[in-house]
Image: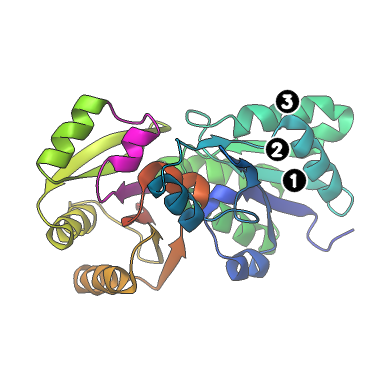
Amino acid sequence: MAENKICITTDCVCDLPDEILRKNNVDLIYFYIRTDSGRFKDVDEITAQNVFDYLRNGGSKTITEAPPSDEFVSFFTEKLRNYEHVIHIAISSKISKSVSNAEEAVKKMGDEGKNVHIIDSGHLSTGIAHLVLRAAEMVREGNNTEQIVAEVMNMRDRVSTSFMADNTDFLYLNGQVSKGIHKICTMFKIHPVLSMQDGYLKLKACHVGNYKKSAVRYIRAELKSGKKIKSNMLFITHAGCSTNDIKMVKRYVASLMKFDEVFVTKASATISSNSGPRTFGLLYIKEK
């Protein structure tokens, strides 16, 4: 039996890099991307760049799929060989079947399933990651399952998950915006800002003009809007941004607020397939 008897797991769409996952003893279950060429395991078999290239070269829309319940059964059963409890923190149930498939798996597992605890994060990408890392920290501190679940549930409303996309091309391809809205956004060079609200991904704002000026307006709106933001950690998560794009974002963030740690992470194919290249987000925790 492991020294810490609680295992923290999450979906691959948490967008945490391998080194942070290993450091915090967090394991992933993988989503799938379906294209005309077949079905591919996210992160392991397909990347965001693969998706971008596929769609740019005439591919039809991609379809993202949560792991089926039988895969969750195998995943959780394996973890319970070494741990007494599993806490799985999943992408929002409002935008994915991950939670429902995981819950179905728990029912299939019978009595053993009582030791698996499913948490609907209400978020995606590194919005999930903030909750995962807090849960892992609490495991190291020796907290029990009930304490960890309660803390994560209480934190959900304080997570801020938002992204600015370069355009609506991929959102339109994957049915996230209508043809009319896509046409207007293209005509006026609108960069949409999307955020998680009540578990849904919703349009939060629109910035008009060139990419850099729009990015600066988005960053300023996020960090200087009067919200009290915890300064311990910020994720800058992106899909297909250039090195110069990220340098610009980091520089402007630093001019507005000092964070103890700033992590730059790449979005998974599942996340990126809906947002498109040159999308980036600022993901943080708000103070109580």
- CA gap between label 2 and label 1 equals 6 Å
Is the residue under label 3 in contact with that under label 2 (CB below 8 Å)? Answer: no
Which disc number belongs to residue 86? 1
Check disc 1 and report its element: helix, strand or loop.
Answer: strand
Residue 236 % position (x, y): 37, 62
The residue beneath circle 2 is 117
Is the residue under label 1 in contact with that under label 2 (CB below 8 Å)? Answer: yes
The residue beneath circle 3 is 104
Which disc number belongs to residue 215? none
- First in sequence: mark 2 or mark 1? 1
Q: Residue at x 24, y 51 (%)?
A: 227
Amino acid type, mark 1: Val
In-image side of 37 versus 253 (left or right): right
Is 173 inside the magenta-drawn segment? yes
Amino acid type, mark 3: Glu
Check disc 3 and report its element: helix, strand or loop.
Answer: helix
User: Which of label 2 and label 3 is nearer to you?
Assistant: 3
Q: Which residues are magenta?
A: 160-178
